[in-house]
Amino acid sequence: MSKFEALTGNAAVSNAMRQINPDVVAAYPITPQTDTVQTFSEFVADGLVDTEFVTVESEHSAMSACVGASAAGARVMTATSANGLALMWEIIYIAASNRCPIVMSLVNRALSAPINIHCDHSDVMGMRDSGWIILMSENGQEAYDNIIQAIRIGEHPDVLLPVAVCQDGFITSHSLERVELFEDGEVQDFVGTHEPQWPLLDVEDPKTYGPLDFYDYYYEHKRQQVEAMEKAHGVIREVTQEFNDRFGREYGLFEAYRMDDAEVAVIAANSTAGTAKTAVDNLRDQGLKAGLLKLRVFRPFPGQELAEALRGVSAVAVMDRAISFGSMDNAGPLFSEVVSALTLNDVHVPIADYVYGLGGRDIRPGEIENVYQEAFQMAENGKVERRVRYLGVRE
Amino acid sequence: MTEMKGWKEIPIGGMILDAGNSEAYNTGDWRAFRPVPGEAECTNCMLCWLNCPDSSILVDAENEEMTGFDLKHCKGCGICAAVCPVNAGVIRRAEGEVEKDDPRLCIRMVEEGKFQEVGNE
Amino acid sequence: MVTKLTPKELAKKEERLAPGHRLCAGCGAAIVVRQMLAAIDEPVVLANATGCLEVATTIYPYSSWRVPWIHNAFENAASTMSGVEAAYRSMVRQGKLEEKDVKFIAYGGDGGTYDIGIQALSGAVERGHQFLYVCYDNGAYMNTGIQRSSATPFGAHTTTSPAGKVIPGKQQFRKDLTKVMAAHDIPYVAQAAPSKWRDLMQKTRKAVNCGGPAFMNVLASCNRGWRHETDETIEVTQLAVDSCFWPLYEVENGEWSLTYKPRKKVPVKKWLERQGRFSHLFRDENRHMIDEMQEEVDRRWEKLLERCGEG
Ligand SMILES: Cc1ncc(C[n+]2csc(CCOP(=O)(O)OP(=O)(O)O)c2C)c(N)n1
Ligand code: SF4
Ligand code: SF4
Ligand code: SF4
Ligand SMILES: [Mg+2]
């Protein structure tokens, strides 16, 4: 029997980690992720897990130790935020390239400078080309559910890629919500045991990890990573389906909220999707056909599925919690992805980007309702007034 | 491993599963000087083996004998000759300068060109 | 049965570093690795920082390592190894892996150790991982073309401390990393050189059996960077030892002891004059630097003697 507990998003993740019982965790404190590893170290101290907790001296070393442990043959987890992720950068790429199925809880926080501890998505957006699978979570429950699935996805023999599971710093990481925790045994059963195919620790069969790879083979190794990402697409569906069946959930690559007859759609990720649902409900009460696409899988990007889900709407608004400085119109990174997905799949519809919530700036349902109102206008006029808006910034 | 393999044919992640396979790679052609056994009798002290950077001193483990040089890999650095105690003895006893390719030595370093000339490689 | 530390016995063992690697002819790093690995009878798992040793031994699709080996990046051999070792401990404790008395060793060059990797190293030994970190010190960033590191000797010409008209080579004395590591109060710290192979091998054995983190700083000549003939590697290395530029000592559970004392201390000049990287110091206007270096070497040597109770 599962049980419900009042937990913060971080505590929900710590509990998932406890139930997964990874062989090695290497992590370093940083707000707003810190109490994930704090809570987890209590589990270690109390003997509730078998994990070796490597209390590294930096995030660079955290990811380095994760790569070492994963290559060794261990099931490995970590957690970080913003500057911590940035310090890991070099090894983020190496983890993916060395095909280490590390699972990371990434509690999204704005990157410096100026230094800020609150939520935006500038941290995760920077790792979008690194070769990691990236899952987004609206709340603590989803973070918990995603972490459990991430183990299976990353370790799948057709994939073998690291997975980052995101949730919004403070907004969900620190707010108490009612979280359903499955039985330890059920989680263990779902994640199964890790069966490394090429463990470095097999001293009878020595292997070389991380050689110097020139122009004659480097490219082939990159091509393999493409294949893994492509396979991940199917594996995510499979694992998600199994998870849904077992635990009574309805996850997909994204969630289509009241999209069936929607005239306009907003696309959002993480906690803002929750706020947007309130906005959708309000608008629906007024008889307006508003819908929401909540992104769950950001990498591999489900472009085609997303385009299909949007085929038929008359306008799209993308909500971006980050700016891709210097990109066309200085839009957010999600916008470019969605625009490409629509264009390449022949869905031609007015689309605008709404950058919001940087450095933890609040976003209220009213503001999102305004976004919808503008979307309805775009739908009516059949054209885009202003392609990128920065919501809530003072002029 | 000379043919170029496609991405489906090689292990993922840049892993090399055939550890130690550099043995198939020829570094012997880097050599400008070749170690060659000379007249002085080898004592099989194995100091040359211990100091060769290229694992290129051949050893007969059973008979505890130094049996020669792995010319496929030896880069001709001359360290074996430099550390050979028998060489040191020859040099100490000799009157005047002893060239590195002096036939009286235990390990001589002979210019590689001399072998190529007679097609000896 | 432990193999006796005689070249004859050791030569019977299986070679752990295969030939066909692409280190330069006469490279000291290869000698250091071969001697050390020959000294260990137990299974080993290696990590290697980016640098000459790593690059030249694993040019895809070739690898010279007949033992498990991992390269991650330049500055993180220690943290990578801490992950490997943690994985081992965890999995053995859980019964997922058979215990085999595996020896974990991380190799890094002086750049990867004294400079960019010092934080990861300090952290890993403080955490008490059971591994040996070996710095093969060739006194510069050789792999990228001989740039200065904090291990580069005073006065040396490197490509970023060139012997110019106004500034004659490196202006700083080298960092004494061995002492920095001794200050971590870990079970075993040693300084060694392949010209004293038995000493190097004994230290290696002590290090991997000390029951905790160990650090060894091993001088590894680079004939390209130091500019000497390829066959002079061992001789030039021994001059560094005999001049007391590179004293051989160990710190075992806090006890300092000299493991080799030159019968007659050789003037540093004798070591310098054998290497092209110091040739500019022999010009009249720069000779004072040789004296300065001698003074500094003497000062450090005297201090060391004191610490080792030989004062
Ligand atoms: C983060 C990072 N910075 C710089 C480099 C470039 N780099 C590679 S090896 C190297 C120098 C290595 O020097 P050292 O550690 O002394 O080893 P050596 O090559 O001398 O054996 C440098 C600067 C790198 N690979 N990674
Ligand atoms: S010349 Fe150098 S590489 Fe060749 S056998 Fe002698 S020591 Fe080894
Ligand atoms: S060093 Fe000289 S004497 Fe000793 S084994 Fe080698 S060749 Fe023979
Ligand atoms: S450059 Fe120096 S350290 Fe690098 S392989 Fe050559 S001799 Fe060895
Ligand atoms: Mg160096």
Image (cartoon, rainbow, N blue to C red):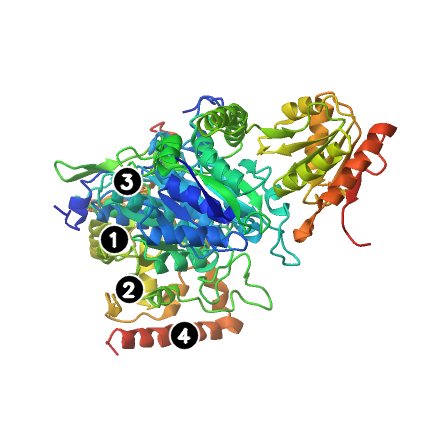
Q: Distance between the residues labelled 2 and 3?
A: 25 Å
Label 3 – label 4 distance at C-alpha: 39 Å
Q: For the residues tagged 3 and 1, is the chain the same?
A: yes
State the image coordinates of residue C177 (x, y, percent, origin top left): 39, 64
Which of the numbered marks, if any, corresponds to residue C208? 1
- Quadrant housing residue A275: top right
Q: Name which residue type carries label 3.
A: Arg
Q: Is mark 4 on a helix, strand or loop?
A: helix
Q: Nearer the viewer, residue B68 or A223?
A: A223
Sequence-wise first label, 2 or 1: 1
Mark 3–mark 1 Cα distance, whole angstroms, equals: 17 Å
| Disc 3: which residue | C16
> Going 33% across and 68% down the picture, which residue do you hit?
C243
Locate residue A157 relative to residue A225 in the image: left or right.
left
Instruction: State whether residue C49 appears in this view.
Output: no
Q: Residues within 10 Å of mark 1 (few under 14, many from 20)?
A: many
Location of residue A57 (image quadrant): bottom left
The chain letter under disc 4 is: C
